[in-house]
Image: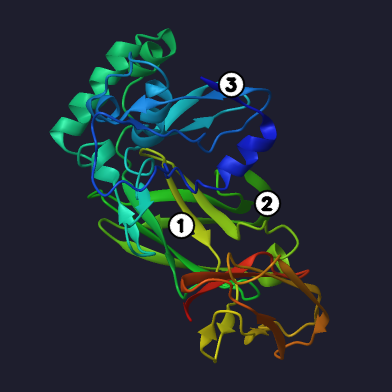
Amino acid sequence: MEKVDRGTLLLLLLLLALGSHLRTPFPRPIPSLPAPHFVGPLLLSGIFQCGPASLVAIKEGDVDLDYDCPFVYAETNADRVTWTYDTATGQKKKIYSETKSVGQFTSTKAVGSFARKDVTNDYKYPEGSTKERDVFNKARGKLNLSTLEATSRVPDAPKPDVSGKFKVKSPPEVGKDVELVLLLTNLASAARTLTANMTAWSIVYTGKVIHEVWKDSLALTLGPKEEKAYPIKISYEEYQKHLTTDNMIRATAVCHFKDGNDAVVEQDIALENPTITLKVPGQAKVGQAVKVEVVFTNPLAEVVSSCVLLAEGSDLLEKAIRKEVSTVKGKESARITFEITPKKKGTKQLVTNFSCDKFKDINTFQVIKVVD
């Protein structure tokens, strides 16, 4: 097995998002070949090892096989359990178990195109199916770890008397307020009185919370089968200083009931960066310079500064290009131009990355057909 230092791990982490497991783009599953294994979204320290794992073994729950089957299986099949902890008594209570958030949208690049191909079913049986649960229990039995055995003896979380969900009112964008609605529905035939403690945090794609950006609480009574909506606004001023380059916010509502089972409502919200446009108006020919134009429009009412554009492309540029723009005023656009000189004919790809003090890593690419 190959030892991987921390620097390499950071590069590998860029290849994963929200539990997705990257593999090489085979046109179809090849059972005799191992699943290439990249380190998943975990908190890391020290030296870690990265080795092969059988794709068939992962799907069938054979986690006792070499080399990293338990780890890759956990990346694609783990359940997510939520607990509450009483700091006064030290008592913890299991209030929510979620089986579908880990290992979804396992992806690879489609052969012959830039489209995403979903390969989730190569790694696991359909989520929630009898076969998937049977394999899950088989894997737990093969591991035979005391921690898992202890967890298995914890009673399932009781079904809450009230269901809830967050609804995003409009597509969230960096620089704008995030508007949500908390919908709470009483599932019981009797009225329920509850207190909901709501919090929003900036997070990174691994799920690690970074900084609290908003909080509120409410107390209400829901009649039998009644639904109520509570509007939420997280202003740009509240989250702008704490948003990471992943542009993610987690909203959570912990609902405590006077009579009934507690509930947790949670949603991760990904905010969109503004876009940049990349145009190559002329025909690209081998050995001839062609103009490229990149346009960034500042969606904010304030000035953005320290703007940098990076561009690179194999057989299009001798080396990466760096262009700097000092500032872009609010609601105005910056137009950046440069030239490329293709070396070889064929289908090439020009990639650009724009960053400034308010927005990081706005990426786009253009497929360019080069002729003689």
Give the residue number, with chain letter if any, for mark 3. Answer: 89
Q: Residues within 10 Å of mark 2 (few under 14, many from 20)?
A: some
Q: Which percent across, then down, holds residue 9?
A: 61, 36
Q: Which percent across, then down, holds residue 240?
A: 71, 65
Give the residue number, with chain letter if any, for mark 2. Answer: 212
Mark 1 in CB contact with mark 2 (< 8 angstroms) = no
* Circle on res. 117: none
Check the image and report above or below for 19 versus 280: above
Please report the residue visible at 78 percent of the width from the left and 87 percent of the height from the top. Answer: 329
Residue 203 at least partly seen: yes
**Residue farthest along the left direction in this orientation:** 130
Residue type at the position of mark 2? Glu
Mark 1 in CB contact with mark 3 (< 8 angstroms) = no
Q: Is residue 77 left or right of residue 233?
A: left
Q: Which of labels 1 and 2 is toward the front?
A: 2
Residue 96 at least partly seen: no
Considering only order in the chain, which callout, 3 or 1, is on the residue closer to the N terminus? 3
